[in-house]
Amino acid sequence: MNQDRWRARKVSIVGAGAVGSTFAYALAQSGLADEIAIIDLNRELVQGQVLDLAHGLPFFPSVEIHAGERSDYADAHVIVISAGTGQRPGESRLDLLQRNASIIESIVDDIVGQDSQAAIVVVSNPVDVLTHVAFRRSGWDRGRVIGSGTVLDSARFRYLLSQRCDVDVHNVHAYVLGEHGDSEVAAWSLTNIAGMPIDEYCPTCGKCADWRGERDEIVKAVRDSAYHIIDYKGATYFAIGLALVRIVGAILRNQRSVLTVSTVLDGEYGLEDVCLSAPCIVSGRGVEQVVEASLSPGELDALARSASILRDAMAELRPSG
Ligand code: NAD
């Protein structure tokens, strides 16, 4: 191999807390990255996480893991931002807004200051609003500044459907769209099992006495998942760590995967200048295309409502310097 042309697939993670460190662990195990840099204001936490992970190197696929600094933005392929504060019990994601917005802005300033060519993946909540904050602050193309969005919610939706329908989760295709939060929209019209739209599949299955009624319960369970986990153990981090590996893997391997990441809409679904999740083609360049799927009129209305809630949250933000 020509060493001059070889460039490590590098991921820089900002925020070494529960989400950032779990993602680092899952990413190291995936073998997708050659180098992982971990950055946090809390230097002792970073040292502890890096040492703990480094002791796993004999068991991971080849990867270099180290404590990072601003210069690690310059040559990263992907920068994942999980810095901020977690949701407190009973606190809505939107309550976190102001606290986390200024953190994101200062991190994005550092990234831009390093002349980075990376794609940014925002995870910190409220993720849709903070992705928009990062997008505006960076001045970059919309495709390069994306949010983890409802990739996690779509996974929860698929899991609950697979449990209810008693079918392998890998054969359940389903998307949650809109806000990663209370106004999210379960897109039943895009849901299919065994290649059949769910409306055709349900009557053939016979596992539910009232399958239409069961749907409302599933949607509520998806929406409330994070609240329950936070009540039980204080934070969510395993599934989001894996969802991030899926998103970052699609970028590093130029996979053109269809994922419900959060992106700034530019007329798609009749919406613009708001960040929310829709099915997107994710490649080495980040979001290449927002797929305009055929939603039902009710789903389109719900998506517009979700967008309007997010716009209101953005309007609440105090302008910063
Ligand atoms: P955490 O408190 O465990 O970790 C956050 C870390 O960010 C801390 O170590 C803190 O020192 C660091 N930090 C704060 N300001 C910083 C800065 N300016 N630069 C560098 N580091 C900084 O929190 P967590 O549980 O890891 O959650 C992180 C974020 O991810 C939260 O906003 C949480 O709500 C969000 N989250 C999102 C999803 C999702 O699906 N989008 C899922 C779970 C959690």
Image (cartoon, helix red, strand yellow):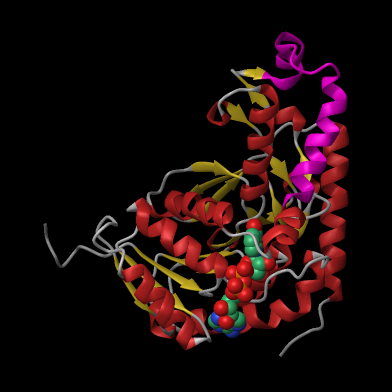
Dominant secondary structure of the residues highlighted in magenta in the image: helix
| Residue most extreme to the bottom | 321
Q: Give the residue drawn at x 66%, y 42%.
A: 156
Query: Does the magenta portion include 207?
Result: yes
Compared with 86, 201 (above or below) is: above
In this rendering, the count of numbered labels is: 0
Compared with 230, 166 (above or below) is: above
Image location (x, y in percent) of residue 31: 32, 53
Image location (x, y in percent) of residue 194: 59, 18
| Residue most extreme to the left | 1
Which one is in front, 84 or 275? 84
Q: Quadrant of ligand 1?
A: bottom right
Image location (x, y in percent) of residue 45: 48, 81
From where the camera sits, is residue 83 visible?
no
- Residue 273 occupies quadrant: bottom right
Which one is in front, 113 or 94? 94
| Residue most extreme to the front | 232
Query: Does the magenta portion include 198?
Result: yes
Compared with 312, 292 (above or below) is: above
Q: Quadrant of the C terminus?
A: bottom right
Q: Give the residue drawn at x 70%, y 30%.
A: 190
Q: Give the residue drawn at x 74%, y 87%.
A: 320
Image location (x, y in percent) of residue 9: 32, 62
Which one is in front, 263 or 228? 228
Residue 85 is left or right of residue 256, and the answer is: right
Residue 280 is left or right of residue 191, and the answer is: left
From where the camera sits, is residue 14 visible?
yes
Residue 79 is left or right of residue 34, and the answer is: right
Q: Give the residue drawn at x 72%, y 61%.
A: 230
The span picked out in magenta is 197-225
